[in-house]
Amino acid sequence: MNELQSLLHQVTENASEAERTLLKEFLIGIQMKQQHTSTTYLNAVLQMDIQFDHDTCIVTFPITPLSYNTFDKPHGGIIATLMDNAMGYLVNRDLKPEGKGAVTTNMNIHYVKAATEKSLIAKASYLHKGRQTLVLECTVTQPDGKRIAHATGSFFVINPSNSSK
């Protein structure tokens, strides 16, 4: 633990205000996962808020420097993660009562424009519900309604309890 405390001290001693804020948000995310208020570290650290409305999953994502690319805009990989999570949360919510889950097998993304606001909203819904495969679509917009990206994703149904065998 002393090595971790030493590193934390060194980083915070030389950190800018923005870096201290990022570190604090990162640590709060880990704490949220430890307290089971978030299902994954990734969602907790990225502060994704997940809501369901019938057959739709809505994920709100605050844009912070942690998500920036070299142009201080949300990185395309972060936007892809946001869309994959929105679609994945929807299918896994619906498969959970059956003791099943789903994994992404394919995702096709079209980036439309760079984000200019402080948050993004991903809305995922079904295009096809099969026994073994599901196809969804997801659109990412800003709060002002401007479209940032659109994706389709295919998911394969699995039985998580048998996946380690």
Image (spheres, rainbow, N blue to C red):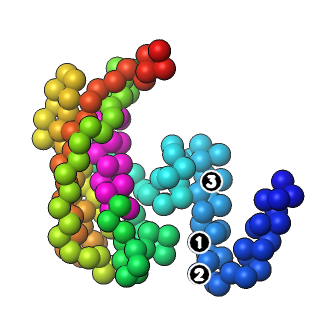
Q: Observer-nearest residue: 17 or 90? A: 17
Q: Is residue 118 visible?
A: no
Number of residues whose C-alpha sits closer than 10 Å to that of mark 1, classed few (under 14), some (14–19) or many (20 or more): some
Q: Is residue 113 visible?
A: yes
Q: Residue at x 72, y 74 (%)?
A: 11
116 left or right of 126?
A: right
Residue type at mark 1? Leu
Residue 80 position (above or below residue 116): above
Q: Which residues are magenta?
A: 78-93
Residue under pointer 3: 30
Q: Are marks 1 and 2 in contact (CB under 8 Å)?
A: yes
Where residue 71 sits: x, y (%)?
A: 37, 82
Residue under pointer 2: 18
Q: Earlier in the sequence, mark 2 or mark 3?
A: 2
- The stretch drawn in magenta includes residue 87: yes
Q: CA distance from mark 2 to mark 3?
A: 19 Å
Residue type at mark 2? Ala
Residue type at mark 3? Ile
Residue under pointer 1: 22
Q: Are marks 1 and 3 in contact (CB under 8 Å)?
A: no
Q: Residue at x 30, y 81 (%)?
A: 116
Where residue 102 sits: x, y (%)?
A: 33, 31
Number of residues whose C-alpha sits closer than 10 Å to that of mark 3, classed few (under 14), some (14–19) or many (20 or more): some
Number of residues whose C-alpha sits closer than 10 Å to that of mark 2, classed few (under 14), some (14–19) or many (20 or more): few
Where residue 155 sits: x, y (%)?
A: 25, 35
